[in-house]
Amino acid sequence: MGAYDSLNELQLDVVKEIGNIGAGNACTALSVLLGAVVDMSVPNVQVLDFDSTSQYLGGGSNQILGIQIDVTDDLEGMMFHIVRKPFAERIINTFYERHLEDLTSLDEMDTSVLSEMANITSGAYANSIATLTNLFVNIGAPIQKCATIGEILKIPYDSMVKPGEKILVIDEEFEVDEEKISSNMLLVLEKNSLKKLFDKLGVTE
């Protein structure tokens, strides 16, 4: 069984529930980071193939900031924060006033703020998985890349999954001080890690 390929209905429900719980915990973590009340709409969680994910996120040529977080230890894989300019600007402006011409104009302080956001919220996702499964799930340091959707998706696509396999896509819509901002979280687990996850949750094919 490949990563998210050929999942039955129960397995899909489990994967989506992990996305829902992780998103809720990420919202709490973001609230602590920003020192503000952060509300979150019920996240939309989907399991999509590479091409569908690219289209869903606005097309392969759409420019975004991808923040890569490696998943290690008992589970192996990657998480990606897909960040667009309004989201980046809102997070940064919580700490200091900053207008971004575009995502390529991020300076060292900006990237530091966004890396901290990614580190904290990714940790919330990882902790959710660990709590549900009793597995040890660690995460790596954030790696940022301003690139097209296609270029970002190519990273896990080339290194971990075969063509046609699936990616867990989580839509995150937050509200901070009555301002709505949105981003996406992608989760890709390697084949053996996904099997281990299901075994721990008592889900079989």
Image (cartoon, grey):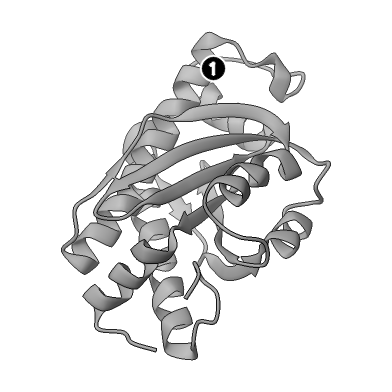
Residue at 55% x, 27% y is 144
Question: Residue 104: image x %, image y %?
Answer: 72, 19
Residue 79 in the figure: left or right of residue 18: right
Residue at 32% x, 76% y is 198
Q: Nearer the viewer, residue 176 or 63?
A: 63
The quadrant holding residue 140 is: top left
Residue with the mark numbered 1: 110
Circle 1: residue type: Asp
Q: Which of 42 and 149 is in front in this view?
A: 149
Question: Residue 156: image x %, image y %?
Answer: 56, 47
Q: Can residue 179 be seen in this view?
A: no
Q: How many marks?
A: 1
Q: Which residue lies furthest to the top in this view?
A: 108
Question: Residue 190: image x %, image y %?
Answer: 43, 58
Residue 132 in the figure: left or right of residue 84: left
Q: Is residue 74 visible?
A: yes
**Above or below for 104 versus 52:** above
